[in-house]
Amino acid sequence: MTEPVHLRDSTAESLLRELAPQVLGAITRRFRDFASAEDATQEALLAAFRQWPREGVPENPRGWLIQVASRRMADMARSEIARRERETAVAGDEEPAVGPPELEAEMDPEDTLILLFMCCHPALSASSAIALTLRAVGGLTTAEIANAFLVPEATMAQRISRAKQSIRASGEPFRAPAPQERRERLPAVLRVLYLIFNEGYASSIGAELQRLDLAREAIRLARSAWALLPEDGEVAGLLALMLLTDARRAARTGESGELIPLDQQDRGLWDKAEIAEGTQLLTFALSRGAVGLYALQAAIAAVHDEAARAEETDWPQILALYELLRTLAPSPMVTLNHAIAVAMVHGPAEGLARLAALDNDERLTGHYRLAAVRAHLLEKLGECEKAVALYRTAAAGTTSVPERNYLIAHASQLEEKRCKGGPAADALTR
């Protein structure tokens, strides 16, 4: 008999996060009730989180979770049958009770991808579909999803709850989408994968800068989506963006998990195989004609990856690409990054002027990234005290511990070296 593998809580949590959407997909496919399947899956995950670190991981962890969740669904079905029988007995109705559906013998290896398309149901608004899928497929918390959408957590909780109710009311079957359905839902699906990857690459909450489980799952699902739609340039563009960005992962943190900004990274640690694959995918995406949102962002990532040293980065090309991105898909974060590119090409004063457009945007009001970028540009202009104050404001506003630590340390170094007459501090570039 194989000895059980015992896990630390953090390791168990990582494994369960990876398995959760697979189990939810399998249970939803079997029982055809998304809301109840999610409840049953959560109970199975909770049972595993309590038992596995103490008793060891079962030989087939996914099967264990599906079995526990299936039992819970069967219990709920029996309870519902008993309730109906009581009601029909009172009413004198002789209709036979309907039992739970039979469990299928085989599991679909792409349950997660099917679940992804199912959650992006046309009955839901785009924002609700994306939020629901981030919760069900990505395993993100409500707070993390709210951060991605720049809305309060309570607002996001209500949005997700309404989305679940809409899915249940729709009676959506759990099956692979027809070709026309794929096309209709693809924009929402790609947006979900993009946000899952972003949260994995730069976690918005907690002690870790990166969450490898989320990033890997986003890349895996993007590969599956591309296999499903191999001629779609935007799917290829998204996968290219993920690979070209993920290639820098090993260089983004130090030995203690501290953040290392882009201009200070050891580029020898960048994954050359991922860069090569991403570049090949980008070339394919650009050859398809109309260039989409993700292909443009992948092109920006590729320009960064091509530079052997930070000083060799082709910022005019990046600025031109951001100009196109602002036209194609304007957003506060695009405007923020565009301002950085403007500053790198035309100087920090011009970059600061571009940031003024965001001061009245309620989505970024008080957001730490706006304060951090403004601090960076003020630092470049030599306005040390204002920069230090804004770095500390940004540090107070982020829920990412590594980012907060970096901002605090940078503010202290800047105050010591610049504000007190010492040598210039390194620039903040992320």
Image (spheres, rainbow, N blue to C red):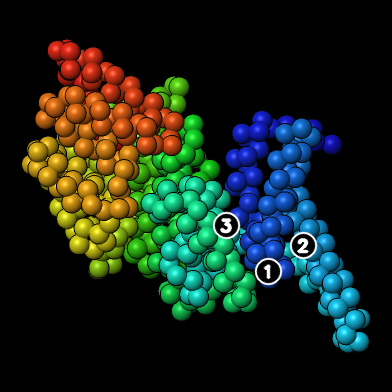
How much space separates mark 1 and mark 3, taking CA atoms?
A: 13 Å
Left/right placement of residue 306 relative to residue 130 reads left
- Upstream in sequence: badge 1 or badge 3: 1
Residue identified by numbered label 3: 136
Q: Residues within 10 Å of mark 2 (few under 14, many from 20)?
A: many
Q: Residues within 10 Å of mark 1 (few under 14, many from 20)?
A: some
Query: What's the residue type where badge 3 is placed?
Result: Ala
Quarter holding the C terminus is top left
Residue 428's quadrant in the figure? top left
Residue at 25 percent across and 68 percent down: it is 290
Residue at 32 percent across and 34 percent down: it is 394
Q: Decide if residue 263 is in sight here.
A: no
Residue at disc 2, secondary structure: helix
Left/right placement of residue 52 relative to residue 88 reads left
Q: Is residue 143 above or below residue 251?
A: below
Residue identified by numbered label 1: 33
Residue identified by numbered label 2: 73
- Across and down, in percent, residue 21 comes to 60, 55
Query: What's the residue type where badge 2 is placed?
Result: Met
Look at the numbered discs 1 and 2 and tell me whether their residues touch, using CB distance below 8 Å. yes
